[in-house]
Image (spheres, helix red, strand yellow):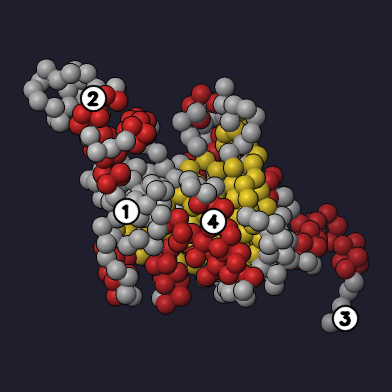
Amino acid sequence: MKDITFSRRVALLGAAALPWIRAVKGQAKPKSVVISSANRNNGGVNCCAKAMEIIKGGGDTLDAVIAGVNIVELDPRDNSVGYGGLPNEDGVVELDASCMHGPSRRGGAVGALRNIKTPSKVAQKVLAETDHMMLVGEGALRFAKAAGFKEEDLLTEESRIQWLVWKRQMRDKNGHTNWESGIDAPPAAKKIGELKRLFPQADEALLEEALRNAANPPHGTINCIALNEKGEMSAVTTTSGLAWKIPGRCGDSPIIGGGLWLDQDVGGAGSTGRGEENLRVCGAHTVVENMRLGMSPKEAALDALKRVARNFDNDEKRLQAVDLNFYALRKDGEYAGASLWGTRNGRGPQFAVSTGDRESHHENCVYLFERK
Ligand code: ASP
């Protein structure tokens, strides 16, 4: 068949060709880009720097993003990911992770995995060595052990104290808790002093955080997406999920299409934040499909957040309780971080970026609503 020229194709296809044209234009000059959520202790910046180092050394994009998030999984100070993550309501750390490899168009995931510090690596094994997509719970642990992963206790002393503070804060309508002597228990331990007496080994900052986290169960995650100069892409999401969750709860992070999606022809997206609300809009897949239809990464992510807001009838008061962020990287190297909420000073939360020609750094997310 005779090849038709680019401009002739455009003329023939008209407006319907626009997304396709953008994608083709975007694919012309790929450059190396890695983005991730920000995370504590410079976790996101370190993750992107590591992934970029591997990409520049000629490594595969999936190996690169996995090595990047491993830094955060192994850091006990990040209590939302991997080792040191806040536990479920039984005091057991349960981890979720998923990954996608663009060139082979394969995915792998694990859910509610216990006792293994790096669930992202187990997800990569599922992708590389099985014809399954997702393993959960006991089966995922057995698979990991068979693959040579070491079983370890993931609960750090800091996370154990936070879990105990949460349990102590659970009171009946009379203010009674099982953890104090007698039915005439004193009021909830709101003052740090009382907690200091109970946990003399803990510093004040930890106890203050524990009190905040008891009242508002926190969640956190790292998502990382990479593109190399050949235009190859991969992505990973890994988390300890929602603190104090019911054992067995999986959020969006291990759900391929929810907390992570990548299409080698278009780009990738991932999320951090309240997983249940993301799953109701199949967020990461929605963001990538939006980009396929011609939206920029910023527009694509904001559109997915608008769908979340729509599920709450755009009622900002009810939405206050929801935190959700998307990260999107298109195949031409354009990227964005987008958040449901901006901060009071008119800035979005941050995300991490490494473009190869610039040191790994933070940039601001765009956002939908501003906290009053
Ligand atoms: N998305 C994760 C979950 O719902 C938690 C988070 O990112 O904050 O499990």
Crowd around label 1: few <14 · some 14–19 · many ≥20 (10 Å): many
- In the image, which disc is placed on residue 94? 1
Q: Earlier in the sequence, mark 3 or mark 2?
A: 3
Distance CA(mark 2)–CA(mark 1): 30 Å
Q: Earlier in the sequence, mark 4 or mark 2?
A: 4
Q: Identify the secondary structure beneath mark 4.
A: helix
Numbered disc in front, either 2 or 1: 2
The reply, left or right, for residue 351 in relation to residue 280 is: right
Crowd around label 4: few <14 · some 14–19 · many ≥20 (10 Å): many
Q: Identify the secondary structure beneath mark 2.
A: helix
Numbered disc in front, either 4 or 3: 4
Q: Earlier in the sequence, mark 1 or mark 4?
A: 4
Q: As rendered, which of 340 and 46 lies closer to the eye?
A: 46
Residue placed at 91% from the left, 67% from the top? 8
Distance CA(mark 3)–CA(mark 1): 57 Å
- In the image, which disc is placed on residue 194? 2
Residue 139 locus on image (x, y percent)? 28, 66
